[in-house]
Amino acid sequence: MKTYNVESFNLDHTKVQAPFVRLAGVKEGTADTIYKYDIRFIQPNEGLMPMRAVHSLEHLIAENSRNHSEDIVDISPMGCQTGFYWTMLNDGNYERMLDLVEATLRDAMNAEELPAQNPVQCGNANHHDFEGAKKLAADMLAKRDEWHIVFKDEA
Ligand SMILES: [Zn+2]
């Protein structure tokens, strides 16, 4: 297979076992280090998260994660709709990352309203599925004890 610039293009997506949380990249600056995680909700090439639910989950994760950590740089959905990239500043502690994802998804699952669902604060305010997002969070949380297993042959 051709090798690419992008780390995840060089990951064999047929060998992973979702859901999982995987450190996908580390970038060292002069004083800071950026850690990029692959938060995979759905088994690649076997399913996807519906786009409206992804959008609502993005809002929920973006807002609630920042109640638990000051070190979040960015959290963005993958175009393949099977997960999110989650980037952290100076925090490469994997167990703490698992706890942060768990706390954030618990907030999402239990949310009573969807943050910023209006045309002033969102670029596609009608394109949401709040209940669908809560279900995605709940399904991911149900497998919390499997998140550290990334590859099928580790299972
Ligand atoms: Zn939005």
Image (spheres, rainbow, N blue to C red):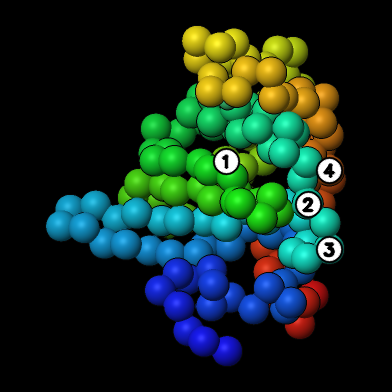
Mark 1 vs ligand 1: CB below 8 Å: no
Q: Amino acid at mark 2?
A: Leu
* Disc nearest the viewer among 4 and 3: 3
Residue at numbered disc 4: 139
* Disc nearest the viewer among 2 and 4: 2
Residue at numbered disc 2: 48
Quadrant containing ligand 1 reads top right
Residue at numbered disc 1: 100
Q: Amino acid at mark 3?
A: Glu
Residue at numbered disc 3: 46
Q: Earlier in the sequence, mark 4 or mark 1?
A: 1
Mark 2 vs ligand 1: CB below 8 Å: no
Mark-to-mark CA distance, 3 and 1: 27 Å
Percent coordinates x, y for residue 15 in the rendering: 72, 78
Q: Earlier in the sequence, mark 2 or mark 4?
A: 2
Mark 4 vs ligand 1: CB below 8 Å: no
Percent coordinates x, y for residue 109 in the rendering: 76, 28
Q: Is residue 97 above or below residue 5?
A: above
What SS does tag 3 mark? loop
